[in-house]
Image: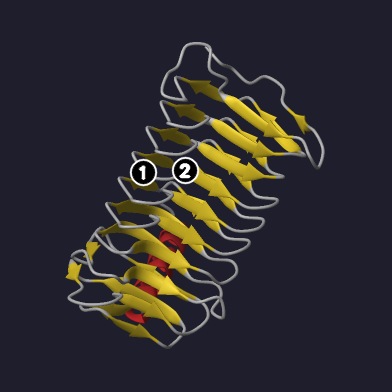
Amino acid sequence: MHPTRRLLVACTILVASTLFATDAAAQSKISKCQTLSASGSYVLGSNITATTGSCLSIAADFITIDLNGFTIDCGGSTGEGVGAGSNFQGTTVRNGTIAHCYRGVNLQGLNAVVEKVRAVSNTNEGITIGSSGIVKDSQASQNGGDGIAVFFYGLVTGSTSSGNGGNGITADNGSSVIGNTTSENGGNGIAASFPLVTKNNSFLNTGYGYSIRCPGNVIENMARGNQNGAPGAPQFSFDTTSGVCNTSNNWEP
């Protein structure tokens, strides 16, 4: 290798290593349940069990929590695994499991992100986020309420919601629900108002596969065996009180 090119490669590796070390050093390690009152990045160093109340309470804007593959287990308490009130925005939770809480993740503020999180066997909702939030590549299963719920103008994508007591996914006005799978939920597979709902698969839910308040776009979705698999039962329900929906290329085998 030419000496100049070798020097350039070495410098690139050194800069990348320095940035990685700086990023790692900037993350505060979490080893117990607590209130997070400073903006910044936090990372779990082990599994955490809550003995009472909520485990991680957000008390500042722009906090990122990397669960780092570990689990927050509330042990059936009445608290939340990770909770933020509506006055705290920009919370991100990713990469782990939250189980046996009252609500798994409950981020009420604007612009929250939940990514690659498993919310399992929580008493109420698995994952709930406020307006303009994103739930991505996550799983919600065996929760007592809705699996995933997003407020106005949210996005749910690449996620799975199954075996929950309520709806698989509930999306408020103007939200987008793209490329998800819902199954065997006690309510509807997907319930959404004025939405974009596309490329989802909804099957074997107690209610409709899709319960939609129009207007909106509901296109290229699959539904089968919903309404307890009753022969000939409609898989889609459209409330057209406020307008009509574009419903092209949906499939009911």
Residue 123 appears in which quarter of the rendering? bottom left
Percent position (x, y) of residue 117?
36, 54
Question: Which residue is at 36% across, 62% downward?
Answer: 103
As drawn, the residue found furthest toward the right would be 243
Quick one: 67 or 187, which is closer to the camera? Answer: 187
Q: To which residue does mark 1 refer?
A: 164
Provide the secondary structure element on which disc 1 rests: loop
Q: To which residue does mark 2 refer?
A: 167
Percent position (x, y) of residue 113?
50, 61
As drawn, the residue found furthest toward the bottom would be 37
Question: Which residue is at 46% across, 75% downward?
Answer: 84
Quick one: 159 or 52, which is closer to the camera? Answer: 52
* Amino acid tagged 1: Asn
Residue 14 visible at all: no
Q: Which mark is residue 250?
A: none
Q: Is residue 197 toward the left or the right of residue 150 in the image?
A: right
For mark 2, does the 10 Å Cα neighbourhood hold few (<14), some (14 to 19), or many (20 or more) residues? many
Percent position (x, y) of residue 166?
43, 45
Question: Which residue is at 32% across, 64% downward?
Answer: 102
Percent position (x, y) of residue 41?
40, 76
* Amino acid tagged 2: Asn
Quick one: 55 or 204, which is closer to the camera? Answer: 204
Q: Are marks 2 and 1 in contact (CB under 8 Å)?
A: yes
Colouring: secondary structure
